[in-house]
Image (cartoon, rainbow, N blue to C red):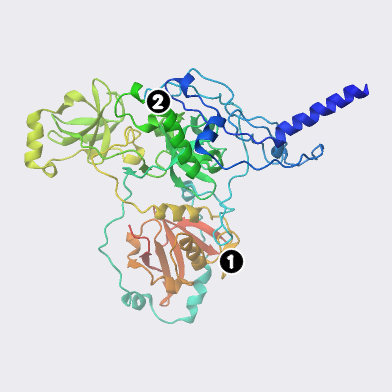
Amino acid sequence: MKKRELIRRWGILFLSLALITGTVSVPSYTVHAGEADSHNTSGEEYAQEVEPEPEPEPEPEPEPETPSEGDDGGDNAGTGGGGSPARSDDGEGGDGANIGNSGTSDGGSTTGGAAGTTEGEFDSDYSDTSDSGSTGMTDAEEGSTGATSEVAALIEPVKVGEMDEPEGYKEADKYNGTNEELIAQQHIVTDLPEIRKDFRFTTVDKVYAFSAHDMYIYEEQSEDSDVVGTIAGNGILYELENEDNGWIYVESGKARGFVLEEELIRGDEAERLLAYLEKRAARISAMLPEGVSRESYFFTAQDTVPYYENDAYAFRRITTQEVVIDAEAAIAKSDAGIMEDTSDDARTVGSLKEGDLVYVIEEADDEWLFVESGDVRGFIPSYELDRSSSVQAQIEEEGESSFGTAKEVITPGENRAIYYSLCSVREGARYNEIREKILEKALACVGNPYVWGGTSLTHGADCSGFVQTLYGLFGYKLPRVADAQSRVGTQIPVSDAAPGDLIFFARNGYVYHVAMYAGDGKTVEAYSTQYGIITKELSERNAVWATRIIED
């Protein structure tokens, strides 16, 4: 090969490497709204208007070398059209490809009647497997190496042998009192209101975020889980809950689920981008109907599964939407059924008696209405209800409480129509979600070891160290040993325990063990050296009382 040709080829190689590894790209933010030709804008224009921090100088170019087996070549990956770095599987060399903004669609991804363009098509084979499962906590706050936090961990509790007692059981041999005497010394409250988790949603403030590139919304906190929504680059989302493990629970459009924190534009940067996009979109505001919300200028996610098939839909019963409405009241003309779908052949989810009170939440079509009566929600033909002005006057005069409501046939949890609309005539009960979170964290530790005197959720804890550390993660300070813990909070009967409450066990007048109630007659607890941290059926033998530390 001629020397000049060799030099030319090496020059091309070095130039390619420089473009791939040394260039700092500026994201290309685009307004997805009505007049695409007047609202597409380059990252350069955005940078001039919002004056971001200057980018650092690129590092000196390294000498080219061939990665050895096992090297993470992802550092040398290219960037997609939207400027977001391409991602590669752990331990694999990146190929410089990404699902970024590389093309245009016909404007089908729109909201609020605003037409626009999407940027890029989703790769059906995209399956990033980067390691994002760590919680980012210290060893005292750790995520788990055992089972996941899915409630499914409760379905098959460990069957403990009749002779296998908790590790602290023999400690009670040192005492000669009785449990009856111990209980008599306590102040156990029996008239606390029942804690009931309402199916209704509550409204929270909007926390804005944008997709850094075309991305997926997942059903679980795992990239191996089902995709429940897709969103184009620079699409708008609302953060509902930061799960503190690299995942954020979001809603966008009709999609609700989990996204990786690293794939979002968040915080101050999101607010700057929001202001910029609003400024650009304001130029066509006169073209949109009066009263259209500002979010209507932007893309939202497209749900890929129906809400009733998405297990993440009601993971947190919170939303940025206004859910309490002043619904029209009506009266059942005769005995009738409330159906799960707009069909006479659908399942009956509730039954009405003549004269029962019904609220019309939404008109489903010309014939069917989506209604709520008591805790029953579903569909009913409009001809079954009296919606006349005289009925309205009767309800107002006699009061709503004087009318009967539908009888539940299918529980809300089994009724696929329950979230056809998030709106209701009343807001959901204020259920302290710390209960869910602390229980999820506890279940994530199932399978981890028991260590006498330990307080590590991953490396080992005893029963009291387990609950002390769990509660500590959420700001509650508990004493170190079970006997002292049993006197903290409100003491209640074991039968009144709600998920997240603590249950204590005693023998010879001494509290030797503590477990966390998980609901449905089950517990999660650091049991013994033999069994480790487990879920099991609640044993009432030696159970003396429960304590409520989390107030609702």
Q: Nearer the viewer, residue 458 or 512?
A: 458
The image shows residue 155 at horizontal and vertical percentages of 46, 48
| Depicted 534 relative to depicted 383: above or below | below
Q: Which mark is residue 283?
A: 2
Q: Quadrant of residue 488?
A: bottom left
Residue drawn 51% across the image and 76% down it: 171
Q: Is residue 360 left or right of residue 128?
A: left
Q: Which mark is residue 451?
A: 1
Q: Nearer the viewer, mark 1 or mark 2?
A: 2
Q: Quadrant of the N terminus?
A: top right
Q: Quadrant of residue 419?
A: top left
| Depicted 342 relative to depicted 171: above or below | above
Mark 1 crowdedness (10 Å alpha carbons): few <14, some 14-19, many ≥20:
many
The image shows residue 151 at horizontal and vertical percentages of 46, 48
Is residue 256 in view from this perspective? no
Q: Is residue 243 left or right of residue 4?
A: left
